[in-house]
Amino acid sequence: MALSPFGQSDMSIGQRLWQINWSFVLLISVTASVGFGMLYSAANGNLDPWASRQMIRFGAGVGLMLVVAVIDIHVWLRYAYAIYALSLALLVVVEFSGSIGMGAQRWIDLGVFTIQPSEIMKVSIILLLARYFYASRMEDVGRISHILMPLILMAVPAILVMRQPDLGTTILMVATGIAMLFLVGVRIWVFVAGALATIAAVIPLWQFVLLDYQKKRLLTFIDPEKDPLGAGYHILQSKIALGSGGLFGKGFLEGSQSHLSFLPEKQTDFIFTMLAEEFGLVGGLVLIGLYMLLLIYAFAISLRCRSQFGRLMGMGVSTSFFLNIFVNIAMVMGVVPVVGMPLPLISYGGTAMLTLMFSFGLLLNVYVHRDVQIGPGAADGN
Amino acid sequence: MHRDGDRYRTFSRRSIVLFGGKVVLLSGLVGRMYYLQVIEAEKYKTLADENRISLKLLAPKRGRILDRFGRPMAVNQQNYRVLLIPENTKDIAHTLAQLGKVIPVDDHDLVRVKREIKRRRRFLPIILRENMKWNDVARIEVNTAEIPGIVIDVGETRFYPDGDHAASVLGYVSGVSEKDLTGDPLLELPGFRIGKAGMEKVHDLALRGKSGTSQVEVNAFGRQIRELERREGLPGAETWLTIDMELQKFVATRLGNEAASAVVMDVHTGEVLSLVSTPSFDPNIFNRGLSRSEWKELASNPRTPLNNKAIAGQYAPGSTFKMVVALAALEKGIVTPKTRHFCSGEIELGDSTFHCWKKRGHGSMDLVSAITQSCDVYFYEIAKRTGIDRISAMARRLGLGQILDIELSGERKGLMPTRAWKKKVKRVSWQQGETLLAGIGQGFILTTPLQLAVMTSRLVNGGKAVKPHLTRHVVPFDAVEPPLPVYPEFASIGIHPPHLDLVKKAMAAVPNSPYGTAYRSRIKEAGFKFGGKTGTVQVRRISKAEREVGVKKNKDLEWRERDHALFVGYAPVQAPRYAVSVVVEHGGGGSSTAAPIAKDILLEVQRRDPSRGQSAGRSQDQAKKPSSKSAKKG
């Protein structure tokens, strides 16, 4: 058997395809179809311009997912750092030469399509941390020196993404990373100390560095309803749309708030609002239920996996997925500030869809290779 | 395995905690959803409807005003307007500047718009321009993208097809001013017009109708997506007047540019067929809005176009008053039809001399010939004996010196002096010389042309206290057929009929006897003959010196100093149906200026009588009926 941690699985491509969790794929497709329906509605009952393109992207995404799923898990382990380095390089490129889109530097125009390095970085961080900790023992993670390196490797892209500025992705990346540190067994007191240190850093910043108008902007950001005609307008309209949907909604294509343009960005960030306006609480619960099922699958896949690398990757992907859902829905309900984050599988957007399907590919990969043992554990197994 | 087991246990434990956390957070979102969509749903549904539904008032169509034959006197016309909706533009000055590139806009507009914004709600449009030409409208339409807040709309505006001919009756509509606001939101609609004068004002509420509402779905940018519900208002009632518009036009044209007025009425029913005051004004310009210079011109015109002379002009009646004096004297028994007085051309009273208009004198006069030839001395004589209080009382019975309640506002009372009145107001005793002057309708006495027409009517209708009116009927828009007009029975004014016949006989002779003062104006066609009385009112004092060298002829005087010319008449002489009064300010003589006008009017009104050509020998009852038939015709 393979002695190297970067060994090979002994399954053939066909066996791996057979091993894929097809019910999970079906679940993803059902959820994405809800999105197609909403994009159809967002265009006032037209496939153009959003629904049709989204279907094509989803089709491409499924292909990408299957490819990612059947690639030998050792390959992902081997190239994890390289993928991270490449993503970081792309971020730097965006930082210095990215074209301006949506008021923020987020895109690289490759002519045929544009890529969003921050989205790619979301997955790369998961790979990076899974790779870094796949062989760590409990004693290792107990040492601060052992977790210093991954913290730095997380902080660098986080700062770059924040500068774009893309607060949503930054928070998502950092939170996913922290969750993975938690999973590998970093001591609780480290998290507590980190939280305290953050507060200790924020207070003097607030007191002495920030100017009044900046504070005001921050406060409005945190509580937009203080400014109902400006920043709070969208959130207020979103809440009106949600609330007026009631229990069963106004009916497909009948959302007055969405269709009369009171709702901003209805095809991207505020698509959940449109769903809840047209299908009411029941419709919203169905979608959250689908998400819940996907999260349960991801959780089960991770727990079932016999390699730490796979487990970390699975939980990383599912946590990132969860954070995406949570921040978006909480945002449109006015629970958290508007940070600009699409709803996974539903919102219109190319890079987000492809990176999400890539990460689902990694999750399926973990499932396919659930019995493959990697690294020190694998040696133990023998 | 042991080491992996260790970290697997940590991983499992912590991932269960993590998963649990996710479940808790998602449940929190579900709870929030439940709160928004179930508990607070009603509130947000209301807010969503407030967002999307905007309620608009629909201005009702203003009722038309028609003449007695149904000929339109005031109608509604299409009107292209440029509106500014203040809340749709951030910078009003910018919008106006952009608009200024297409149509002329000046600083006054900006000032006016800013003022209007203050008193109206910001979502209510403000009118920038009305009655736009089509090519200007098209140019604005093309550029609407660059002119935020500008909307073009087609409304309706009042239009008076006959311009200034009927302004004295119709009045006009114009914009709602601040003091007109009653809280009725209809009045706050841009461009809403209310009646400000004349019949437009009298029947304003009925003409206005009831406003409708339109629920419009609007999007976040205020653009209307569709109409959800429309409740049409009720158009205003159609108002039929007693005026005969063709006659009105005829009279107005006949009076021309003189400062004059004329009233034509039915002596039995009191229906006013024509009420003209010239020069007049075009009510359409009040609707459009007058410029400062237009207003100045109207207000400073010495012939007072804004004054409705027919009801508000107060004139000494002059010789047209002689019938009143005659009746008062007859009633008192001071004169009989046979009583004669000699006119030498003047009469002495104390140390004053009172002159007859005929310097050489009329010779021996009886009552009828004194009226026919308008002998002043005869009336000085009988007035002196009758006394001012009796003369005034008779005048009042005939409708003079009082408000007659013709619906129009601005009606004046005139003046019928009495001894008590002079004592009270002038604080001096009545002088007998003043009674003499009153005998020829001069001095303190003041009457309006309307009163003179009513007086004439009462003289010839058998002594009935007829009152004038202008409204035939107000017909709700959904009425099938206008109701027939109902005429009140007028009470008798209690004058002995033979006295009235005597006066009528004298009046008939005025244009028909070769000695009559209006003989030159007689109507020769059989059956159309009229009767009447001339009046010439001196507006200046003629000094003794002037009298010695010869009284100046009117044509040698300044316009302001010339005599007023009056005529009161009726026709046809056999069975009087129409009465007319004509007053031409500074027009010269009653017989030379007013009588020909009255003759033309009386001829025209008789020719236009729809009952003409029907069976001859009409009774009074028959004379009434055709007018109601004619209403159906229109």
Image (cartoon, coloured by chain):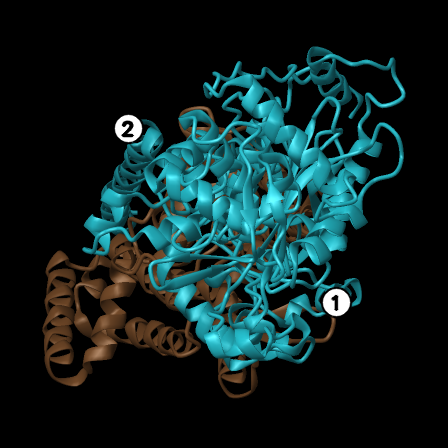
A173 vs B341: above or below: below
Q: Which residue has dot 2 on it?
A: B39
Q: Which chain is brown?
A: A
Which numbered disc covers residue A245?
none
Amino acid, disc 2: Ile
Q: CA distance from mark 2 to mark 1?
A: 48 Å
Disc 1 residue crowd, few under 14, some 14–19, many 20+, Cα 10 Å: few
Residue A131 horizontal/vertical position (percent):
41, 64
Q: Chain of mark 1?
A: B
Q: Secondary structure at mark 1?
A: helix
Amino acid, disc 1: Val
Residue B316 horizontal/vertical position (percent):
48, 53
Residue depicted at x 59% and y 73%: B551
Residue B466 vs residue A358, the one in the foreground: B466
Q: Chain of mark 2?
A: B
Asked if labels 2 and 1 share a chain, the reply is yes
Q: Which chain is cyan?
A: B
Residue B613 vs residue A19, the one in the foreground: B613
Q: Nearer the viewer, mark 2 or mark 1?
A: 1
B527 vs B544: above or below: above
Q: Is residue B606 visible?
A: yes
Side of A68 where A195 appears, left or right? left
Q: Which residue has dot 1 on it?
A: B142
Q: Is residue B407 visible?
A: no
